Amino acid sequence: AQSVTQLDSQVPVFEEAPVELRCNYSSSVSVYLFWYVQYPNQGLQLLLKYLSGSTLVKGINGFEAEFNKSQTSFHLRKPSVHISDTAEYFCAVSENTGFQKLVFGTGTRLLVSP
Amino acid sequence: KAGVTQTPRYLIKTRGQQVTLSCSPISGHRSVSWYQQTPGQGLQFLFEYFSETQRNKGNFPGRFSGRQFSNSRSEMNVSTLELGDSALYLCASSRGGTGAKSYEQYFGPGTRLTVT
Protein backbone atom coordinates (compact mmCIF):
# COMPACT_ATOMS: atom_id res chain seq x y z
CA ALA A 1 0.00 0.00 0.00
CA GLN A 2 1.16 3.51 -0.68
CA SER A 3 2.18 5.96 2.03
CA VAL A 4 3.26 9.58 2.22
CA THR A 5 5.61 11.21 4.71
CA GLN A 6 5.79 14.90 5.40
CA LEU A 7 8.58 15.21 7.93
CA ASP A 8 7.99 18.83 8.86
CA SER A 9 4.79 19.51 10.75
CA GLN A 10 5.45 23.24 10.81
CA VAL A 11 7.76 25.51 8.83
CA PRO A 12 8.20 29.13 9.97
CA VAL A 13 9.65 31.52 7.41
CA PHE A 14 9.96 35.26 6.90
CA GLU A 15 8.15 37.03 4.10
CA GLU A 16 10.07 37.09 0.78
CA ALA A 17 12.31 34.20 1.88
CA PRO A 18 12.43 30.93 -0.09
CA VAL A 19 10.78 27.83 1.29
CA GLU A 20 10.86 24.08 0.68
CA LEU A 21 8.25 21.68 2.04
CA ARG A 22 9.39 18.09 1.96
CA CYS A 23 7.42 15.06 0.83
CA ASN A 24 8.48 11.44 0.44
CA TYR A 25 6.27 8.60 -0.72
CA SER A 26 6.31 4.83 -0.84
CA SER A 27 4.57 2.66 -3.42
CA SER A 28 5.17 -0.58 -5.30
CA VAL A 29 3.50 0.68 -8.49
CA SER A 30 3.60 3.83 -10.57
CA VAL A 31 2.02 6.85 -8.92
CA TYR A 32 0.65 10.28 -9.54
CA LEU A 33 1.64 13.01 -7.09
CA PHE A 34 -0.18 16.10 -5.88
CA TRP A 35 0.19 19.05 -3.56
CA TYR A 36 -2.91 20.62 -2.04
CA VAL A 37 -3.28 23.74 0.09
CA GLN A 38 -5.90 24.27 2.76
CA TYR A 39 -6.77 27.65 4.22
CA PRO A 40 -8.67 27.84 7.53
CA ASN A 41 -12.24 26.59 7.33
CA GLN A 42 -11.93 25.71 3.67
CA GLY A 43 -11.56 22.63 1.51
CA LEU A 44 -8.43 21.56 -0.35
CA GLN A 45 -7.19 23.47 -3.36
CA LEU A 46 -5.02 21.72 -5.93
CA LEU A 47 -1.65 23.51 -6.11
CA LEU A 48 0.10 21.32 -8.63
CA LYS A 49 0.38 17.77 -9.91
CA TYR A 50 2.82 15.36 -11.45
CA LEU A 51 1.13 13.00 -13.89
CA SER A 52 3.88 12.35 -16.45
CA GLY A 53 6.52 14.11 -18.51
CA SER A 54 8.82 16.76 -17.10
CA THR A 55 9.79 16.08 -13.50
CA LEU A 56 9.69 19.79 -12.67
CA VAL A 57 6.10 20.93 -12.44
CA LYS A 58 4.80 24.42 -11.89
CA GLY A 59 1.59 25.24 -10.13
CA ILE A 60 -0.48 28.16 -9.00
CA ASN A 61 0.69 31.04 -6.82
CA GLY A 62 4.35 30.65 -7.90
CA PHE A 63 4.84 27.17 -6.41
CA GLU A 64 6.78 24.41 -8.11
CA ALA A 65 7.76 20.85 -7.26
CA GLU A 66 10.23 18.31 -8.54
CA PHE A 67 9.50 14.61 -8.87
CA ASN A 68 12.53 12.50 -8.00
CA LYS A 69 11.79 8.86 -8.69
CA SER A 70 15.07 7.49 -7.30
CA GLN A 71 14.59 9.30 -4.00
CA THR A 72 10.81 8.86 -4.07
CA SER A 73 10.38 12.52 -3.27
CA PHE A 74 8.16 15.35 -4.43
CA HIS A 75 9.30 18.47 -2.58
CA LEU A 76 7.39 21.73 -2.93
CA ARG A 77 9.26 25.01 -3.36
CA LYS A 78 8.62 28.70 -3.67
CA PRO A 79 11.42 31.23 -4.21
CA SER A 80 9.73 34.06 -2.32
CA VAL A 81 6.77 33.59 0.02
CA HIS A 82 4.04 36.05 0.96
CA ILE A 83 2.03 36.44 4.13
CA SER A 84 -0.95 35.08 2.19
CA ASP A 85 0.87 31.74 1.70
CA THR A 86 0.27 30.94 5.38
CA ALA A 87 -1.77 27.73 5.25
CA GLU A 88 -1.61 23.94 5.62
CA TYR A 89 -0.01 22.07 2.74
CA PHE A 90 -0.72 18.42 1.98
CA CYS A 91 1.23 16.08 -0.25
CA ALA A 92 -0.82 13.23 -1.73
CA VAL A 93 -0.25 10.18 -3.89
CA SER A 94 -2.58 8.17 -6.07
CA GLU A 95 -1.53 4.79 -7.37
CA ASN A 96 -2.06 4.06 -11.04
CA THR A 97 -4.66 1.37 -10.42
CA GLY A 98 -7.73 2.82 -12.07
CA PHE A 99 -9.21 3.93 -8.74
CA GLN A 100 -9.28 7.53 -7.58
CA LYS A 101 -7.98 7.12 -4.06
CA LEU A 102 -5.66 9.75 -2.62
CA VAL A 103 -3.39 8.94 0.29
CA PHE A 104 -2.30 12.06 2.13
CA GLY A 105 0.63 13.04 4.26
CA THR A 106 0.03 14.54 7.68
CA GLY A 107 0.42 18.07 6.38
CA THR A 108 2.89 20.92 6.88
CA ARG A 109 1.78 24.21 8.35
CA LEU A 110 3.59 27.07 6.63
CA LEU A 111 3.78 30.14 8.85
CA VAL A 112 4.92 33.29 7.06
CA SER A 113 5.75 36.27 9.24
CA PRO A 114 6.68 39.85 8.28
CA LYS B 1 -17.21 25.96 -14.52
CA ALA B 2 -18.76 25.72 -11.09
CA GLY B 3 -16.72 23.87 -8.52
CA VAL B 4 -17.66 21.03 -6.22
CA THR B 5 -20.47 21.97 -3.87
CA GLN B 6 -21.33 20.36 -0.56
CA THR B 7 -24.38 20.79 1.61
CA PRO B 8 -24.84 21.52 4.36
CA ARG B 9 -21.67 23.34 5.37
CA TYR B 10 -22.22 22.80 9.09
CA LEU B 11 -24.15 20.23 11.07
CA ILE B 12 -24.64 19.52 14.74
CA LYS B 13 -26.03 16.12 15.66
CA THR B 14 -26.47 14.07 18.80
CA ARG B 15 -24.92 10.67 19.46
CA GLY B 16 -27.04 7.86 18.05
CA GLN B 17 -28.60 9.96 15.31
CA GLN B 18 -27.89 9.55 11.62
CA VAL B 19 -26.82 12.14 9.08
CA THR B 20 -26.78 12.53 5.31
CA LEU B 21 -24.30 14.75 3.50
CA SER B 22 -24.60 15.80 -0.12
CA CYS B 23 -22.06 16.50 -2.83
CA SER B 24 -22.49 17.85 -6.35
CA PRO B 25 -19.43 17.29 -8.55
CA ILE B 26 -18.01 19.51 -11.25
CA SER B 27 -20.07 19.26 -14.39
CA GLY B 28 -18.85 16.38 -16.53
CA HIS B 29 -17.05 14.62 -13.67
CA ARG B 30 -18.24 11.08 -13.10
CA SER B 31 -16.15 10.03 -10.09
CA VAL B 32 -16.87 11.21 -6.55
CA SER B 33 -14.69 10.40 -3.56
CA TRP B 34 -15.27 11.12 0.11
CA TYR B 35 -12.66 11.85 2.77
CA GLN B 36 -12.77 12.41 6.51
CA GLN B 37 -10.45 14.96 8.07
CA THR B 38 -9.78 14.99 11.81
CA PRO B 39 -6.95 16.51 13.87
CA GLY B 40 -5.92 13.09 15.14
CA GLN B 41 -6.17 10.91 12.02
CA GLY B 42 -5.65 13.49 9.31
CA LEU B 43 -7.19 12.97 5.89
CA GLN B 44 -8.57 9.50 5.34
CA PHE B 45 -10.27 8.01 2.30
CA LEU B 46 -13.83 6.80 2.84
CA PHE B 47 -15.03 5.59 -0.55
CA GLU B 48 -15.20 6.34 -4.26
CA TYR B 49 -18.15 6.14 -6.61
CA PHE B 50 -18.07 6.01 -10.38
CA SER B 51 -21.13 5.64 -12.59
CA GLU B 52 -23.31 4.90 -9.55
CA THR B 53 -21.05 2.05 -8.38
CA GLN B 54 -18.80 1.99 -5.34
CA ARG B 55 -15.39 1.13 -6.72
CA ASN B 56 -13.23 1.46 -3.66
CA LYS B 57 -13.72 1.65 0.09
CA GLY B 58 -11.49 2.75 2.92
CA ASN B 59 -11.13 1.22 6.34
CA PHE B 60 -14.28 2.57 8.00
CA PRO B 61 -17.10 0.71 9.75
CA GLY B 62 -20.31 -0.17 7.97
CA ARG B 63 -22.05 2.79 9.64
CA PHE B 64 -20.51 4.85 6.85
CA SER B 65 -22.22 4.37 3.52
CA GLY B 66 -22.78 6.27 0.35
CA ARG B 67 -24.42 6.30 -3.01
CA GLN B 68 -24.21 8.05 -6.32
CA PHE B 69 -27.05 9.09 -8.56
CA SER B 70 -27.31 9.03 -12.34
CA ASN B 71 -26.40 12.74 -12.49
CA SER B 72 -23.18 11.92 -10.56
CA ARG B 73 -24.33 13.69 -7.42
CA SER B 74 -23.41 11.73 -4.33
CA GLU B 75 -24.57 11.37 -0.77
CA MET B 76 -22.89 9.83 2.21
CA ASN B 77 -24.70 8.61 5.27
CA VAL B 78 -23.45 7.97 8.77
CA SER B 79 -25.75 6.03 11.06
CA THR B 80 -25.63 5.72 14.83
CA LEU B 81 -23.32 8.68 15.22
CA GLU B 82 -20.48 8.54 17.71
CA LEU B 83 -18.50 11.41 19.22
CA GLY B 84 -15.49 10.32 17.18
CA ASP B 85 -17.38 10.97 13.96
CA SER B 86 -16.96 14.70 14.50
CA ALA B 87 -14.89 15.79 11.54
CA LEU B 88 -14.70 17.74 8.33
CA TYR B 89 -16.09 15.59 5.54
CA LEU B 90 -14.69 16.43 2.15
CA CYS B 91 -16.01 15.43 -1.21
CA ALA B 92 -13.83 15.40 -4.31
CA SER B 93 -14.72 14.92 -7.93
CA SER B 94 -12.64 13.79 -10.86
CA ARG B 95 -13.21 13.04 -14.48
CA GLY B 96 -12.91 9.32 -13.85
CA GLY B 97 -12.39 6.97 -16.74
CA THR B 98 -8.92 6.26 -18.07
CA GLY B 99 -5.82 8.35 -18.49
CA ALA B 100 -3.61 10.27 -16.11
CA LYS B 101 -5.85 13.34 -15.97
CA SER B 102 -8.64 11.18 -14.60
CA TYR B 103 -6.72 11.08 -11.31
CA GLU B 104 -6.94 14.82 -10.70
CA GLN B 105 -9.34 15.36 -7.81
CA TYR B 106 -11.00 18.68 -7.01
CA PHE B 107 -12.39 19.23 -3.56
CA GLY B 108 -15.46 20.94 -2.21
CA PRO B 109 -15.49 23.20 0.86
CA GLY B 110 -16.48 20.35 3.14
CA THR B 111 -19.21 19.71 5.70
CA ARG B 112 -18.23 20.29 9.32
CA LEU B 113 -20.04 17.68 11.43
CA THR B 114 -20.12 18.05 15.18
CA VAL B 115 -21.51 15.19 17.25
CA THR B 116 -22.49 16.01 20.83
Image: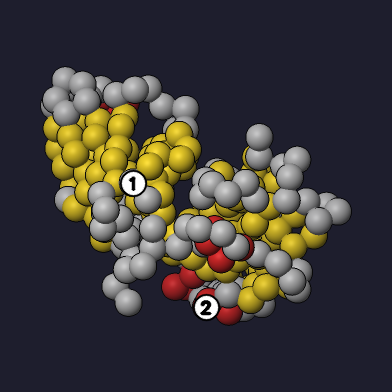
Of the pair B113 and B95, the residue shown nearer to us: B95
Q: Position of residue B106 (x, y in %)?
A: 42, 62
Give the answer, above or below, for where A52 lies relative to A107.
below
Of the pair A100 and B112, the residue shown nearer to us: A100
User: In the rendered view of the protein, which quadrant contains the N terminus of chain B?
Assistant: bottom left
Tell me the SS state at disc 1: loop
Mark 2 — on which chain does it sit? A
In percent of the image, x 29 and y 41: which residue is there? B67
As shown in the figure, which amino acid type bears the numbered disc 1? Glu
As shown in the figure, which amino acid type bears the numbered disc 2? Asn
Crowdedness near tag 2: few (<14), some (14–19) or many (≥20) residues, C-alpha within 10 Å: few
Tell me the SS state at disc 2: helix
Q: Is residue B77 visible?
A: yes
User: Residues under labels 2 and 1: Cα distance?
Assistant: 36 Å
Q: Is residue B87 left or right of residue A69?
A: left
The residue that mark 2 highlights is: A61
User: In the rendered view of the protein, which quadrant contains the C terminus of chain B?
Assistant: top left
In percent of the image, x 63 and y 57: which residue is there? A33
Mark 1 — on which chain does it sit? B
Give the answer, above or below, for where B52 lies relative to A58.
above
Q: Single out the residue that lies furthest toward the right.
A: A70
Of the pair B26 and B113, the residue shown nearer to us: B26
In percent of the image, x 75 and y 73: which residue is there? A54
CB under 8 Å between discs 2 and 1: no
The residue that mark 1 highlights is: B52
Q: Is residue A102 visible?
A: no
